[in-house]
Image: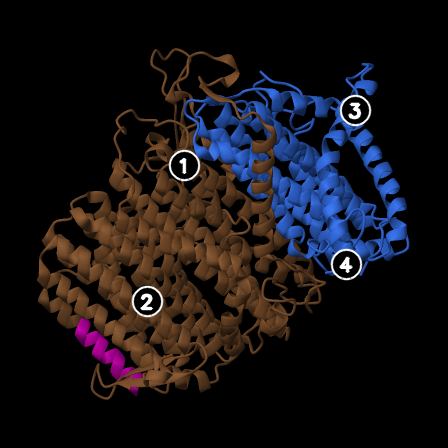
Chain colours: A blue, B brown
Amino acid sequence: MNASALLLQLMQNVLVLLAAPLLLGWINQCRAWLQNRSGAGVLQPYRNLIKLFHKDAVLAFGASPLFRITPYILLACMWLAAALVPVLATDLPLSPAVDVIALVGIFALARVFISLAAMDIGTAFGSLGARREMLVGFLAEPALLMVLFTASTISQSTSLITIVETLAHKQFVLYPSMTFAAVAFVMVLLAENARIPVDNPSTHLELTMIHEAMILEYSARHLALVEWAGALKLLAYMAIGIALFIPYGIAEAGNWNALPLAIVLLTLKLLLAGAGLAFIETISAKMRIFRVPEFMGTAFLLAVLGLLTHFLLET
Amino acid sequence: MFASVGVLPIDAILGVTVFWLVLGLGGMALQKTSLITRIIFPLGAVGSLILAAAALGGLSEIDTAVLPLGLPDLPFHLRLDALSAFFLLLLGATSIGISLFSAGYFRRMAAQELGLLCLEYHIFLASMTLVFLADDAYMFMVAWEAMALSSYFLVTTDHDQPEVRRAGFLYLLIAHVGAIAILMGFGVMQGGHGDYTFDTMRHGHLSTFWASITFFLALFGFGAKAGILPMHAWLPEAHPAAPSPVSALMSGIMLKTAIYGILRVSFDLLGTQIWWWGVIALALGLVTALFGVIFAAVQVDMKRLLAYSSIENIGIILVGIGLTIIFHTSDKAALAALALTASLYHSINHAFMKGLLFLGTGSILHATGERHLGKLGGLIHKMPNLAWIMLVGTLALAGLPPLNGFVSEWLMLQAFLLSPGLPQAYINMLVPIAAAALVLVAALAGFMMVKFYGVIFLGQPRDARIGVVHDAGLWERIGMLCMVVGCIALGIFPTFVILHLDFVTEILVHDSLGKSAVQSGWSMLTPIAAERASYSPLILLFIIVTGVVLTMLVVKKFYHGRLRRGATWDCGYPEQSARMQDTAEGFGQPIRQIFEWFMGVVRKMPTPFDLHPHYHAEVHDRLWDLFYVPIKRANEMIGQQIGKLQHGRIHIYLLYSFITLLALLAFVE
């Protein structure tokens, strides 16, 4: 572990933390454009956060310490996930601590904490949201891991750095297995980040809500942290997607000259991915909660198909 | 440590066994509740500690002993090798906490009853120790039966309740069906020599056919003790019936005696293995795990929920054993060592986390008198100590990093992922799909644990009668803290654990992970090679804690910190009552809906004209109808047919004897 690598790690840590709301803002802006609205601008999430941080926190009478600590744990987990995915350079000293399976474990940890916090006050909406969140979670997790398994059988490794290095070094080939996996991954990304068609991030007072139902009782700084963690989660998922499917242009270990290009490329990839997400959300409608198992089942089958294709065609 | 004072580990372990028996008898004689709880049980915990230390010392050596007890010319053979030592370590390390907890838990029991329970409790511990030490079939069966009987009496402690008696009977019945299968397995293995020592069996050579017969007899017989499908029916009945420390002992340790038995027979006593044994064990393990977790998620009784979760975890361990057999027969020793390590690691993890959770349910039961999840709620306000202790167990059982449950699941998934390259092409393709099923099990376990913790500890009390409750007592808390320490240490320092597990994998599959597992330093777990996979719970924990602390400091520095308490918002609905929260049934509803084909659900719906509509749904185990009931019917039918032979007239019986004699004579001719 040398000093430059450590510096790089620190840089990525700060960068993801600060840039996460921007990605959310960009997606919302794209959605507005696609829906013929003028939109609130890409900086709106920052304004929301500042507003929330200025407010007085209101805590329900029945809230326990678990309820108050959860936003911090949530933020820490998502920050960790987003900071350890190699998207800028393959030289992240802390990345070996967490491989793809552990990464899924961290997402699960955050999910369990937010679900517990939702049940803490004892409201009808809270436990309803918790139950649904865990439902989506246990459906999405196998599909996500099958996607990751496909990538890791190609590179013979579950370490993110090795996966990225293997895929980035190979000549650009369209792996049939990775194509299936990519489609499955997008479906998992939509479900895990509470986007349409599984959940709608921009409505309240709807009996179909999942994520918003869980965080109803949060206010002010707690809500700000939860929102920020949500933005970080979206960024982390996009980063994983970029690392697995389009890692090209990433800076090699110790190669600082390649870094500016890597930053430009990464920004472009994120902008494209965000626009793509907004497009998907605009053309699809939210589905009933019990259609979600079918949706996630499709994602799982696609991922399995990818893995089988790998065994049949690519070995 | 033991060598320096001139005591062999096996002698120390036998000493602890005798010590436990003396303690049990002493408890019988004392006849005073306060003395039994304050002296006998803590002393029993000291015995456990010595046992754990001796077992740790015994990991690296092989000791044998012959006890001149038992029948004439049939002395008891004892042997301590790494496999025994590992399971003894598991027994010692987890029973420390359980015994300390018992010191607080039984403080209100009547002296006479408690004396008996104390005797049974310590006989139970001692017989499990002897099961792990036995080196001949005779000794093994004696210890095995002592274990079954003592645990039967422990399960039926509250024998004035009919359902407890029923649960005890079911347990005893299935335990004995299993014991018969084990006995027959030993009978096949001794191969007609008449010598039942394990040493002879080790050197015997069985044909493929008889080896397979033995393996499946062992899988069935030990499976009945472990709760492997379809012999699981006793688990969800017996665990809720038993007092909580006994449930912890049974679920945490006794189920592992069956795992020990399967490993002992299939890797040590049987010289050969065939790859499809592994496939069947793997498939059976997966079905068991899925069955367990799905049923756990719909339970409404907190101890039944945990019992089903034990079935799930045994399934996961069996998956690892199956994978080990597949790798071992394909000459992939390193991978076999990885899968076996994962299995053993999960065994000890499960002992700690399930022990902890069962102990916790004991405290809840004492405080509230309620096992039904639908009436609990909000206990985090009334029992804060217990709530935080149980949070650790909950997260561990849900398989979340950085706790112990995640490490073994991670190792297991690594074993699955590294499987490509097996000679059987179909298995190569099916193995990753089995891995996906395992992930589904793990994810469902998360669902189940959120339900368990959320319904018991969070929200508001669902039943107004559960008002005044007290937190867990000091002894109870100390006992549970021992288990918490185990869960955390096993989660944070996996490399140390694996270095010790190496002794076991070395004798069973002749390879070990140790040399590759620690190549990047002790804090980084790298089972095969650093570039293939690595995981560091310590760094992970460090980053998360740093993240939490940093965020808190920054928020504290820049935020005005104003906070007020207010009424619940809940989208502006003014009327809030505890009845509006999710019940345990409600929380399990998605599982019921998605997996309805898997379980039998009996629903009673109200008609539209009902003035007092009542909705009732009940989940049934289909295996009762598909497996147990037909066997019972067949049994009764055969019984009736045989009954026809019996007329009660002496001359008819004499005629039977005469015909038998003639037939025998003809046969001898």
How many angstroms separate mark 2 from mark 1 (CA)? 42 Å
Callout 2, which amino acid? Answer: Leu
Q: Which residue is mark 3?
A: A42
**Number of other residues with Cα within 10 Å of mark 3, as a class: few under 14, some 14 to 19, many 20 or more:** some
Which residue position holds label 4? A155
Image x and y of residue B434, in percent: 61, 54
- In the image, is B270 to the left or to the right of B461? right
- Is residue B323 magenta-colored? no
Q: CA distance from mark 4 to mark 3?
A: 37 Å
- The picture places residue B623, in percent across and down from the top left corner, at 42, 47
Count neighbours of disc 2 (C-alpha within 10 A) and say few if under 14, some if 14 to 19, many if 20 or more. many
Instruction: Compute the Cα span from label 3 to label 1.
Output: 51 Å
**What residue span does the magenta drawing correspond to?**
B656-669
For the residue marked with disc 3, what is the amino acid?
A: Val
The residue pinned by badge 1 equals B619
User: Could one spot residue B278 in this view of the protein?
Assistant: no
Of marks 4 and 3, which one's residue comes earlier in the chain?
3
